[in-house]
Amino acid sequence: MASMLQPQIILLKEGTDTSQGKAQLVSNINACTAVADVVRTTLGPRGMDKLIHDDKGSVTISNDGATIMKLLDIVHPAAKILVDIAKSQDSEVGDGTTTVVLLAGEFLKEAKPFVEDGVHPQNLIRSYRTACNLAIEKIKEIAVSIEGKSLEEKKSLLAKCAATTLSSKLIGGEKEFFASMVVDAVIAIGNEDRLNMIGIKKVPGGNMRDSFLVNGVAFKKTFSYAGFEQQPKKFLNPKILLLNIELELKSEKENAEIRLSDPSQYQSIVDAEWNIIYDKLDKCVKSGAKIVLSRLAIGDLATQYFADRDIFCAGRVAEEDLNRVAAAAGGTIQTSVNNIIDEVMGTCEIFEEKQVGNERFNIFSGCPSGRTATIVLRGGADQFIEEAERSLHDAIMIVRRALKNSTVVPGGGAIDMEISRYLRQHARTIAGKSQLFINSYAKALEVIPRQLCDNAGFDATDVLNKLRQKHALPSGEGAPYGVDINTGGIADSFANFVWEPSVVKINAINAATEAACLILSVDETVKNPKSESAQGEAAASAMGGRGRGGGFPGRGRGMRRR
Amino acid sequence: MVFSMKNYGIQSMLKEGHNHLSGLEEAVLKNIDACKQLSTITRTSLGPDGMNKMVINHLDKLFVTNDAATIVNELEVQHPAAKILVLAGKAQQEEIGDGANLTISFAGELLQNAEELIRTGLHPSEIISGYTKAITKTIEVLEELVEKGSENMDVRDKEQVVTRMKAAVASKQYGMEDILSSLIADACIQVSPKNPANFDVDNVRVIKLVGGGLHNCMVIRGMVLKGDAVGSIKHVEKAKVAVFAGGVDSSATETKGTVLIHSAEQLENYAKTEEAKVEELIKAVADSGAKIIVSGGAVGEMALHFCERYKLMVLKISSKFELRRFCRTTGTAALLKLSQPKPDDLGFIDSVSVEEIGGSRVTVVRSEEGGNKVATVVLRGSTDSILDDLERAVDDGVNTYKAMCRDSRMVPGAAATEIELARRLKEFSFKETGLDQYAIAKFAESFELVPRTLAENAGLNPMDIISKLYEKHASGNTKVGVDLRGGDSEDGVCKDVSTMNIWDLHVTKFFALKYAADAACTVLRVDQIIMAKPAGGPARRDKPAGMDED
């Protein structure tokens, strides 16, 4: 529309941004490598943490790949894919999120020179997919099954897996302590396998070693009214009543109105209200319950009423805690106090209120169904406990997956080296271009041991060559050798109990390859102008965009900033 | 800009701001140019080795795909002539559900060749008549190319279905077509009704769950709902089910009302009566034999309490469409209000259970025997974009199934048909008298687009391959096509498709070519464009920077 006399062809809407060709692909790769570089240094036991200060002013310290990726708030469309795979790894296996981003970044980096040299991306993609399938088969082949072992044996094996995960985290120093705690918790919830049945409670203060596992439910004492002190704080085998109603003097219904023609009736109405609440309380007491928990408020009248009758009560219990108590104690949550039957009441062996740090905790232990566990975490700063919680979450997920799939592979970069060797060997049998591509895929896998060394301050080249030599031994005895983080040399990861569930590796390699192939397969980006409805959002994100620009050097040239 | 125009000719008759273009140079060639640009965008996505496009639409949603229908849909094409191509693509997508890219690319190629003819001096009307003759001939030849014996097929035989579906799926997800097409075939066969022509694509559902990989994908007879069950009962087998579309709660008046209480007894009994009423309703449902209550709206706390008491599983499905499908799967009649259902209204479910797939909780509703009404393909992949793309591949596959239920004839794929068409049309053109001959020859040439693009996209040498293909076809083997996998070995590029088992549905090709030819002719027929000034609305001139780049 620049000039009427010589009309230009306007194929697309004004403001549409297109970019295509090799340059576009290379810029996408650059963006992804930049993202991978951000998380690179967090890998492994000697990885460093990241401090992220978001636009709301809250501070997070983490070395969990998924957490970092989420908080980075990436806008580049290609780099977003990396965030997606980190999330997917997080939801599928829970750990290995840094690995997956790093691998995807490395695959792309290796592909870049080929693309620049004019290789058609489809050739690369095909070879990468082949390599991925080979790698996964190899993992399955090497993996050691823990099926059929006794419970004790299994426990110690699972603890090793958990310890491997935890060693890369902030709480790595106490990994044995936490590993056994996590395994106990996961075994406690049994086959039910509902993650929300494991609660993690954080209490600042004390040190990590003061953390403990409750075989049941624990939650912080709720807000209480006068009279609470008189209530007994310890019960053996009490009946537990779980409610979802308010035990308070209140208007019965919002849309009800009382109109009186006779003032003498006024007192009777007041009495009626009291009757209603007394009636409710009476029913609770009659049910024989010794502990009354409610999701909604339990007022001071009720508190005193219960205190008089040696009953413990807690109002405003968080819903997930209440659900957990229901599952553990075997009761159901009641929305009415009428017609309470024994069946809906729960029970547990011991209930007590305990002091933990400067908080008081209500602890239910020895529950009949036993399908819940709560970990009470102690530690210094808030951020520290937050990170500890994330680490434990990873460890819990790992143990769950290991329990389900029950095969493990050696960690510490050993498995990556072994696959790399296997692929290199395989590549030699291929005629044609894909030999090169599979070789570079194999090389990309070596990034894991290399980064482990780099992060620990070892000479990566040196260690890597030692590893290659070991893995190349014809007898195959060198297969489990990985980086020894303690000495700076190499060691048998399997013998040192550096174990990972095989599903973590399989999923990581699969997801990283998928993402790399997806990015390689894009040759054109078309960005439409935002519509009216999205305009408001656009303004908001543009503000954020400027802030992010600084920390994001590799933004693709293809995308125009608006 | 508009105001600086001198008013003369037709411009003076129209309202200010009209855009008027006419003549060969201004209208026809410009139109062709625009269409060419569009088809250049989609062309690189053609075939199994086609590249993906990243499209960010006006709502900031990211698409990574090589499905032409999706690309042109999200591109928001503005040019009127290019829009005709888009519409042709859409028509193909709606008619068959696959082959939209062939339509657009082929139309673009036809127009490009027409441009050459126009430049050599042919009049568009001659080209049109040539093209029309050519397409009629093409359709005749296409009939002849149909593989013998393919017109009869058993749409419940998985192997036959997979053969016909594979090429369509492979063009979207190359390298995964074996797994995907067998999944899709399974799902389609399960829901195929007695009369296959009545197959409804809506009965194959897709649910996308992030995590895992393609090898974790599966087909479930029945439905998969995202989200957890409402109550604490998570698993029920072989049970009757009642559906309440309006929600499960104590009834409340729509009109705002106030309850007037006159005495103390009334106040005391108020809550009790309400509670009793809910209990009565839930009890009535439980008495009817139902074990599962499905609610289309909110589930009240009080109602939930009694459902738990009577051991009823409660599911919430807020989407009306999903609820309707659920009713179809289970054979339930949805009731509007919470009340005692009649025995006829109850449906039956083999099992309902809440399962965890890749970190997210889903409710799996299985009905194995009851009815083969709905099947769900559970897709797994590591990113949302991959999942979306897989979903489109599944959609294409399901649509192909629908097409093959109507017409199961197939033609050789992998560009074998196109080369054969090109060869025969060329021969045909020599017999024509008059200027049509040139147009028909160009039409024939346009078919080379398919093998050329397939080869280009795969990183092979196109000219080499096309000449080889012609040579093979001339020697009588009409089923030789491009083998993309044989790229590494030198002579393996051209192969007989029947050995590779790549087949396209006749009906897909038929419509794709027909729509493309129609669209091309429509574009050629235009010699004047008159664009009215866009009425009212917000001014579009606030982004001058965007225009400079276009």
Image: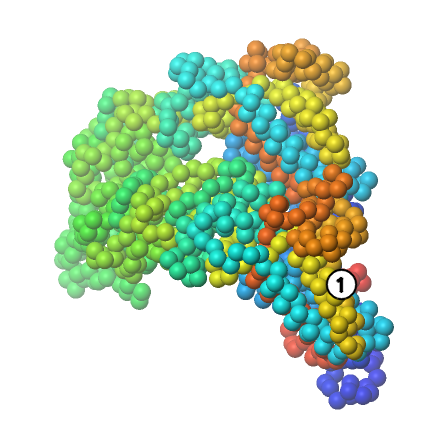
Tell me if residue A456 comes above or below residue B270 in the rendering.
above
Position of B97 with respect to A254 (left or right) is right
Quadrant that contains the C terminus of chain B: bottom right
Q: Which residue: 52% across, 37% down?
A: B215
Position of B453 with respect to B159 (left or right) is right
Residue B335 can be seen in this image: yes
Q: Which residue: 57% across, 45% down?
A: B177
Q: Position of residue B393 (x, y in %)?
A: 56, 51
Tell me if residue B442 comes above or below residue A294 in the rendering.
below
Q: Seen from this angle, which residue lies furthest front? A: B475
Q: Are there few (<14), some (14-19), or many (20+) residues within 10 Å of tag 1?
A: many
Q: Nearer the viewer, residue B340 or A237?
A: B340
Secondary structure type for disc 1: helix
Q: Which residue: 65% across, 27% down?
A: A42
Q: Position of residue A28 (x, y in %)?
A: 72, 44
Residue A29 can be seen in this image: no
Tell me if residue B521 comes above or below residue A406 in the rendering.
below
Q: Position of residue B285 (x, y in %)?
A: 22, 52
Q: Which residue is mark 1?
A: B445
Q: Nearer the viewer, residue B460 or B5?
A: B460
**Type of amino acid at the residue the image marks with label 1:** Glu
Position of A46 with respect to A465 (left or right) is left
Chain where mark 1 sits: B
Q: Position of residue B120 (x, y in %)?
A: 85, 73
